[in-house]
Image: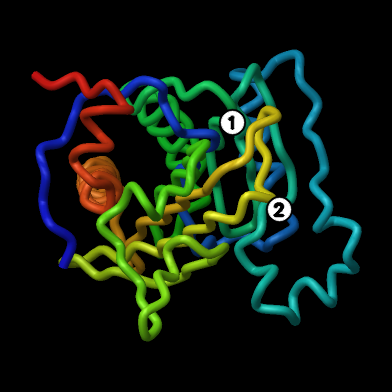
Amino acid sequence: MVKQKRIPLKITPCPITEAVLEIRFDSKYPDEAVFGILYKDFSGKFPNLTPTPLPILSIPEPLRKQDINFRFQPHYALKQDNLSLQIGPKVISLINAGEYQGWGKFASKFREYLEIAQNSDVFESITRIGLRYVNFFDNNILLSSDLTINLSEIEINKQPIFIKTIFESGKFKSLLQLANDASIIINGKTGSILDIDTYIEQKISFSQVNQLLEEGHAEEKNLFYGLLQQEFIDGKLNPEYT
């Protein structure tokens, strides 16, 4: 279990390079009909934008339907500023790339789009809610974390390493991926990636979505701050508390 810590309202500089909110669903409509139904209602929010086909559409449809890895992939994107709304036959996701808008604005925008989708009547059932945050640090984040990995007398934390594991907390699971390899370069800087995908997989009613988004966000934050040393949070991230 990850140690619980006091959660800041804000840290500076913000390490988030990409944030993703996603729902997966089953629909009563054929796969090929879902995007057209949703786009008709979403187009008012993106009046001057043409949908961008995503690379998966270059794969023949029979192969897409046979491969389970393609089932929840988006087919089209609608982009506005640093937000991208991505839609597939069984998935809707909102991606905030670059400067993070903050949870309040980001979640509010996602809820707005989900309301539109709900009114389009494409949801037969919601099967997964996920929140993914990709964070970049310009140091070896393992040395600033409470994670320790030892092999005999060798401190593995100082070596280039990739970690992938799943944490469970109540009804949520969190897929943690961490890489401290110096070959990772973002904005000309080398460093580490801390990637957390917190999700719940079960049959979900639409009335539960808002509460589960908030609970999932709290779980993700608890894991993120629980992994970092308090000295690093206080000394490098300038935390702001209530």
Classify 25 as above or below 222: below
The type of residue carrying mark 1 is: Ala
Q: Which residue shows up at 71% across the image and 37% down it?
A: 77
- In the picture provided, is 137 more to the left or to the right than 142? right
Residue 27, image x, y percentages: 53, 61
Classify 241 as above or below 156: above
Where's the N terminus, which quadrant? bottom left
Residue at the disc numbered 2: 33
Badge 1 vs badge 2, beta-carbon distance below 8 Å: no
User: What crowding class fits label 1: few (fewer than 14 Cα within 10 Å), some (14-19), or many (20 or more)?
Assistant: some
- In the picture provided, is 213 more to the left or to the right than 169? right
Residue 166, image x, y percentages: 36, 71
CA gap between label 1 and label 2 equals: 28 Å
Furthest-front residue in this view: 153
Q: Which of marks 2 and 1 precedes in the sequence?
A: 2
Residue 242, image x, y percentages: 8, 19
**Label 1 secondary element:** strand
Circle number at residue 237: none
Residue at the disc numbered 1: 97
| Residue 164 seen | yes
| Residue 202 seen | no
Q: Which residue shows up at 11% across the image and 44% down it?
A: 5
**Label 2 secondary element:** helix
